[in-house]
Structure formats: structure tokens, C-alpha cells
Image (cartoon, coloured by chain):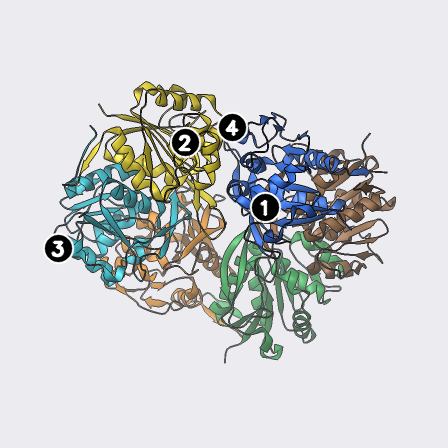
Chain colours: A yellow, B blue, C brown, D green, E orange, F cyan
């Protein structure tokens, strides 16, 4: 039976940060359930393209619609070996949903691997599970990491950091490092032959 | 000599939240200096349209370019009777600029009126001036207000709240209430005749 | 009881020229009824962003949806102390609506203050109330002002002009001057303390 | 030697209203010089897509860039057998250019065929050549036709009208009728065999 | 009774390549039936703006909605004197529709003029009617022309080529040449007087 | 020393189809060189969002800019263990570049794994390496596969097919299957523990 990962997404999640980890984990052999509060399997979320095009912060354009494949209301965290949280503008509003925070805390309680990229750290901060932990996040979210008692990891934009079961990274250029470290945290190994 | 207000903006500030307070304050008689880090009078910022179009959180589209009329590097807070901070996506990155935080703290130190709308509260939180204060913000930013020790005011989307010299509101529908309370905090009065 | 202003808008009204005067007048204490032909309170209009981005005339992008708060069909001009007409692309089509023209003429008849910005002057011209009057408008609309017998005021883009009860201006950079003169025409006064 | 037609365009001319007549006239055998004030052969104008998508007036989206093939500054009206004026948002600002109005008057003076579609009639009105003439235009421009002394032709959206050397039509759905009548005015004939 | 031309279009047909030939043929006197599989008269297709804006291939933006005026399901090729196929992204998917290919083959069988521009050649290739024929197409489609046994005509972007009853061209700048040659193939003549 | 994969991309490659395989292969441990004709490491390509939003074929919106990390001019196919070709609108124009076709043929010659998704098959067809091979492609490209002598695999949109060293799939929903089969073709194995 395949191992299952839970993915927490919402409207205006960053497009790459949603599809790359979703298809990466599927491609190496996990089952991934992508869920969003108040939505069911077959519903979709809108995504956003966050890119750097000359302004002092990222630009935003509309991305793909991303199809969910499981029901948020039916999530049982015991079914999953790990949790993954994409960034973009979804974490901002997802963090005020009590069930979202409970889900994160349940994974944290039993120390199952939790991966968050970019603004995904906003949910970790709101769930109050990063006190004393070294956590990466989109650089402009460093104040939130610190207000929640975390140690902000000031790493390169394409790097990631693992502190126990928490695997975090600053933004989508870090996907390879971040997903590689998440595989390690999950106990998986790749042999290129 | 006209009384001066300082306005802190940046790229992807919300379009309404930038122009409405700017022109409101000019229209009732203040001089307003709109500044952005690393920019000068005559430079412009890109703005963003944040609206509700059916998704679980706000949509974003490109807005007007907004022309700055003063140099950030030359700001002397002693020249101003109040500070105003628009929302949108600018406060997120402005809050990691040390001079931005110092400017906010200087206004706070001498209890000059400070008005912030929507994500503007992110700067107040990062400046650590809201401990024990009742503060409104975009609802999805409530966790940030609380992590910074503030009391999040759960008010209507078109309402505002004044706690001492801090005047805050959840989003642009609250502009009339917010700007009216800011005028009061500044000691101004309007007589409709 | 608060004094009421009537605001005439329509689809593709300019975004700033709709929201800035609406919230300015609310913020200083007026009640404002925003109406559009064939629409009711709670309906919305689409707005347009008109900006200058290097072409020989303004660019257009989609703006916010603007929510109306009163029914056009129920307008009784006797209820209002003044009329305000935003610009953009709405005045062009609103001017062929006979009731729109009648409303303008009723305010004009009793010399209640009428404020129009940018293309708003197209409605004043079509209502044939500007003969011999000094009127500002978006510069490209000067020929329309003149064809209607008005004296086109060739003023700066951020300036406004009052001729009797008519307060007009060329475009949104003029909002502060225009709204300040409109307050004066309405008999209001602001005391900054 | 081929017969030459002059075409007056500018930024944000309607995309269809620019390219369809340009290529129609070339395709049947005319030479067409497309010019814009302050631009030369090889420069381009931005065009606009005007369409009906549910609002009370047309929507606007960015269209193709349209390449000019002659210099405005070198126009000698004696070289041309007719003049054609597309619509969109270009005529609004072109009508305040004195040389544009002179060019129109020179064609009118010698009664060479002049074709205008949609907002193109704004230039005819500003040039003051439609007094007593039956002229079609975009319906929302009817007040301008009348203010200039013209008789507004209230015809179907896909119809056109010829009054002497003036051939006018309400919008791009009328291109076939409008261009056919323009051919007739120019003395051309098509034999389908 | 007017002579009829059939036009095969679909979603994301190029905007110019749809409307210019449609209105050109109407304007010179043909009746044109524009049809799309699974659609009827009064339905519309979305079009695409294909332009060159600095990238190595064309950019795409949304164009006008184009209204169909006949039912695909009712097409009887015997009713038409010629067939015209616009380009853009529609031909790619239309070529897998068996009835589309049959329609093309029926015109080809009786050697009635067939005009295709840009990606329209993809349908000619899929219908397998270009073996040994000299055919123009969008340059990047040359491999498809050759795979189907056609001789790719490497002509200028604004030129067209006629080989028997096939009239083809590389892209919309070629419309005048292409439509002129199509008129010739149809036996029509224009006399400019 | 890490094993290297070559990735062939170009302007308006599909956004997901570019970044997902790029980061998937990096994440499992390969080095990936992404190249585009006439571009170097550090240059970027524009990408396109291809999605299904109700029309008869995919919609297109602008995607992220994708940064290349190697020089096309320096490609030596002997350095790589495999080749990967994303889809979108890039393959259409890349297939007319002789060096692109040579690169594909060099991988094919020595039977190194070649993966192509969606329109990527257009390059395989133009390189004439699919005669008798079972190949998947975007369904609308089936005629091109067949014209080139390939056997079009009519599989589900999220499935992939391997025929010898060729691994192909219809579109981005198939990434997990496609990339998993590509890993197999490369001799790699994943152990989830």
C-alpha cells in the first residue's frame, strides 16, 4: 500500500509551489492528497504566479487552476506519513482556519515530517509550533518567524533547512533542495544507478 | 504653513489604499509626502488591485503607477504631524527595512497619530509598537497582530478603531471611518455648514 | 440628519475617479448615493484603470468592481445638496440616457453644486448646461466643451476650476483641488486645528 | 500607378477597425498610407480590442501593435483619392491635433471620399465638416454629431450610410457595408464573375 | 443570388486571421458562412492575438469573441464556391475532427478554391491533400507541410502562393496578397475605376 | 560526479512542463542543463500557462520567466545521460532549428533515454526518429505523430508510454507517470523506506 502525504493548499497558492511538490511526490511513488478548507475532491483552487520582474517585491499574475483530489472535511492525519505546505497567498488566510492549525499540530505532535516553503511558514508560525526551531521562510516573512519564537534561517534562495521534522525553504527556486531534504526526513532514498 | 503627513508606501501597495488617503488628506488641506525606500520624488511605485471576485481570498490585478513626491532618504519625522501606512503587498517587504521601522517608532515615541489600513498593521507589528494595543488589520493578519502582543479588533470591514494615537482599519471599505478617525486624532474638524 | 450627495457612475468609470470622491465625501461627513442606470443598491459596476504608460493617450486596464449603494430608478434630486460625476468611459454612454440628462438639468436648474472630473464633462455638454460657462475636462474633450458652447479651461492637470455652481477638473491628479473646491461650493469648511 | 488612400490612426485605435479597412483596401488594389501624428513609417501604434462582454458599454483589452507605413509629417493630401478614419480611442485625442483637422478639411474641401467608423466621427465633428450632413457614429457619440450640427443616422450596428462624399458607420460589425459603400464612393467596382 | 464561401474556425483562431478574411469577402460581395464544430449560428468562438513582441516566437493575448453565423452540423459543401481557413491555434485541434477533414476533401475533390493562412495549413496537411503541392504556412509549420508531402513555399511573410486551387500564405501580414489571389482563384475581378 | 540531463526549452514553453521536470530531476539528484537556441546560462525564456477553461482547446496566459543555466552553443550530447523536452508552444519553432534536430538525433543514435511531453513530440516527429515507434503527444498533435510514421498512443491524459528509449506523455497531468518512467529508463530507483 502506498504511503500517503497530505498537502494543504488554498486559493492563490503559488502555482509552482503547488504543482512541483505535488507531482514530485507522486512521481517518486507517494500518494498525495491535496486539500483545501470548504472544498472537495474535484474542486479546484486558483493559483498565482509569483515572479520577480523588476519591482521591489514579487509580481503576481493568474496561474493554472489546480484540481484538488481529496476532501478537506475528511482528513484524518493518522493516514499520512507527512505534511507539505506550499506558499503563495494561500497560507495567509488558511492560518486563520482552526482545523488547518489543528492538522498542523497533529503532525507536529507525533513528529511526522512537515515541509513548508515560502509563505507556508506563516501557517507554522500561527500554529505556534516553531518556538526555538530553525525555520526558513520567504525573507519578508522573517519577522513572523521571529514573533512566533522561531530562529529565522537566513539561507540562500535556493537552499533549504531541516530542523528535526521541520523542512523549510525560502521560495520555489529551493524546491530541489527542499524536496530532497523532505525525502530524507521521510526515510526515502533515491539510487540513480 | 501647511501641516505635513508622511505616507509610507512600496511596490504593490493596494491601489485604493494608496490614492484615497493620499488625496483625501491633500483635499482637506494637509501636505502629504509619499515615500518609498530607495526611491525619490518623481519615482513611482507599482500598485495592486485587491478585490473580491469569488475566491476564498482577494484577487490581484495590476493597478495605477503611483508617483512619489518626496525622497525616503531625506525623511525627518520631526517635520510631520502624523504618519499613514496603506496596505496591499508593500507592508510585507517594507517591514524588513530597518529605517522603515525606525520611522514608525519615532512617530510612536512622541505619540503622533499613526494610521494603518489592512496589511499596514504588519509594519506596526514588526516595529513592536502594538503590545497591549487594540489594533485592526486585514482579518487574515490577525495572527500577526496577536503574535506581536496586540489585541486584534474584530470589527466590520468598513469600520475603524482608535486606540490612543493608533488608528487602524481592516481594508479599503473602511476608508471613510478610518480617515475620519485619523482627522480626529490629528485634531482636525470638518463643518459641513 | 446628514447631507446627501448624488454620484452618477456607470461601467468602466475610472477607478480612482469613482472611489476617491466617493470615500472623500463620506469621510468628511456626507452621505453619498452612488447610482447607475438600470442598476440597484448592491449591484456593482466594472471600473477601468486609466494611466499613462508611454502611449499618446491613456492606457486602460480592469479596475475594482465598485458597489452601488442606491437605486437609480428611485433618485429624487430634491433629496441631495450636490451632484458629482466621475470620469472614465462611463460618461460617454451615460450621456445618451434621458433620465441622466434630466437629473443633471434638475441640479443645474436650482444651482446646486455639480462637480465633474475628466470625461464627466461629456455629460454636462450633452445636458446643454455649459453654454458660456468656464469648464475643465479631459484635454481631449475640449472640442466637446466648445461645441456645447462652453469655455474650455486650459488649466494644469492637477488643477480645478469653479464657475458658479459648476466645479470641474481635467483628470484624477486634480482630485485634491477639485474636491476642495466642491466642499467650498457646498458651503463646508475644514479646520485642521 | 496605384491609387492611394490615406488612413489616420493613433494609439488605442480599435484593432479590427484599423487592420480590416487597411487590408481590405490593399487587397482590392489600393495603396494605403497609414499615418499617426509624431510617428514615421516603421513606427507602430498600440491598438485596443473593444468588445461586448456583458457590461453596459464595451470592454477594452490590448490588441496587436499596428505598424505604420508612412510619415505623418510628409502627408500631402493631393496624393490621395480618399481618406479613411478608424475608431477606438484614437480619434478622441487625434481631434485636438490641428494638422489632423486640416487634413480632414482638405479632403472635404475637394469632396474626396472620407470614410469614418465608430469614434472616427469625433474627428469629423471636431473638424466641423458635418453641419447638415447625415452621419453615423458609435451610438454613444450621437450627442457629439448633433452638437456639431450633423444629423445622427440611427442605423443598425452592421449598417453604413453615405451622404455625398462622407461614408460612416457605427462600429466594426458594419465594416462590410461601410467598405462596400466606400468602394462605391471611390468609383470602384467588384465583379464576382 | 450571392455566391457563398465557407469559413472553418474554432476557439483561439487568430483574431485578425478570422475577421479580416470574413469581412473582406463580405465587403466585396460574397456571403460567408463561418462555422465551428459543435457550434451553431449565434454561438461564438474565442480568438487569440498573435503578435511579435520580442520573444523567439509569437506572443498570445485574448482577442475579440467572434460570432458564428451558420451551423457546422448543417454544412453542405455543394452550397459553396470556396473554402477559407484562418490560422491561430484553432487548426491544431480542428484537424482531428473527421468532419472537418471530410469538408476539406470535398472542396479539394472538385477543385474548388481553398485558402488557408498561417496554421490553417495544418488542416490541409492532416487532410492529406497537399502531396506534391506548393504550400505556404506559418514558417514553424514547414515540417508539417513536408511530412505531408507538400513543397513548403519559403516566401516573404507578406506574400502568398497559389498552386492550382490552393491559395496559402504564412501569416496575417500576407492577407492582402492572399485574399487578392483567392479572389483571382474564385474568378472575381476588381476595377478601381 | 552527478549524472547530467539535457533539457531543450524555448519561449512559451508550458510553465509546468518546464519547471516540474527540471526540479523533479534536480530533486532526485541529477544535474540538469536547461538550454535554448541563441541563449546562454543566465538568460531566461518566457513561459506560457496552458489550461482548460471551457473552450474547445487550451487557454494561454503568461507564466513565469524561466532561467536557463547552460549555453545552447556549448552543448555536447556526450556529456548527458538523457534528454528531456517540455511542451507548450516552444517545440513548434524549435523544430526548425537544425542543431536542435541534430541534438535529438544524437541521443537517439546511441539510444539514450529521451523524454517528451505534450507538444514536445513535434520535435521528435521533425527529427524523424519515431518511425514505427509508439509515441504519446498532445492529442491534437496525433496527426503529426502519424505523418512522421509513428504509432500514436491514445492513452489517458495522466498516463505515459515507454517504447524503448522514448518516454512520452500527452500533457502535464501525466508528469508523475512520465517522470517515473523516465527514471526507470535512466536506470534509477526510488526506495520510499
- Contact between labelled residues 3 and 2, with CB atoms less than 8 Å apart: no
- Contact between labelled residues 4 and 2, with CB atoms less than 8 Å apart: no
Chain letter belonging to callout 2: A
Q: CA distance from mark 1 to mark 4?
A: 24 Å
Q: Which mark is residue B147?
A: 4
Taking the image as shown, residue E4 lies to the left or right of residue B183, namely left
Secondary structure beneath label 1: loop
Chain letter belonging to callout 4: B
> Quick one: label 3, few (<14), some, or many (20+) residues within 10 Å?
few
How many numbered callouts?
A: 4
Of C127 and A81, which appears nearest the observer?
Answer: A81
Taking the image as shown, residue E162 lies to the left or right of residue B149, namely left
Q: CA distance from mark 2 to mark 4?
A: 23 Å
Q: Earlier in the sequence, mark 1 or mark 4?
A: 1
> Would you identify the image quadrant in which residue D88 lies?
bottom right
**Does residue D111 lie above or below D147 as drawn?**
below
Give the mark toward the camera: 2 or 3. Answer: 2
Residue E40 shows up from this direction: no
Residue at the extreme right: C110
In the image, residue A117 lies at what x, y percent? Answer: 38, 36
Q: Are marks 3 and 4 on the same chain?
A: no
Q: Identify residue for label 3.
A: F109
Q: Identify residue for label 2.
A: A9
- Contact between labelled residues 1 and 3, with CB atoms less than 8 Å apart: no
Give the mark toward the camera: 3 or 4. Answer: 4
Taking the image as shown, residue E145 lies to the left or right of residue A45, namely left
Amino acid at each position: 500500500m502506498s504511503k500517503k502525504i497530505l498537502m494543504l493548499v488554498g486559493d492563490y497558492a503559488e502555482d509552482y509551489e503547488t504543482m512541483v511538490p505535488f507531482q514530485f511526490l507522486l512521481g517518486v511513488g507517494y500518494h498525495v492528497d491535496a486539500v483545501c478548507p470548504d472544498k472537495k475532491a474535484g474542486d479546484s483552487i486558483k493559483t498565482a504566479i509569483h515572479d520577480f520582474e523588476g519591482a521591489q517585491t514579487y509580481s503576481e499574475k493568474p496561474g493554472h487552476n489546480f484540481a484538488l483530489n481529496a476532501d478537506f472535511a475528511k482528513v484524518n492525519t493518522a493516514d499520512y506519513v507527512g505534511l507539505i505546505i506550499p506558499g503563495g497567498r494561500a497560507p495567509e488566510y488558511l492560518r486563520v482556519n482552526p482545523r488547518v492549525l489543528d492538522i498542523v499540530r497533529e503532525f507536529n505532535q507525533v513528529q511526522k515530517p512537515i515541509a513548508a516553503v515560502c509563505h507556508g511558514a506563516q501557517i507554522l508560525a500561527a500554529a505556534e509550533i516553531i518556538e526555538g526551531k530553525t525555520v526558513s521562510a520567504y525573507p519578508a516573512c522573517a519577522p513572523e518567524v521571529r514573533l512566533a519564537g522561531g530562529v529565522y534561517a537566513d539561507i540562500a534562495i535556493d537552499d533549504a533547512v531541516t530542523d528535526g521534522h521541520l523542512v523549510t525553504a525560502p521560495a520555489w527556486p529551493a524546491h530541489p533542495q527542499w524536496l530532497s531534504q523532505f525525502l530524507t526526513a521521510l526515510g526515502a532514498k533515491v539510487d540513480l544507478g
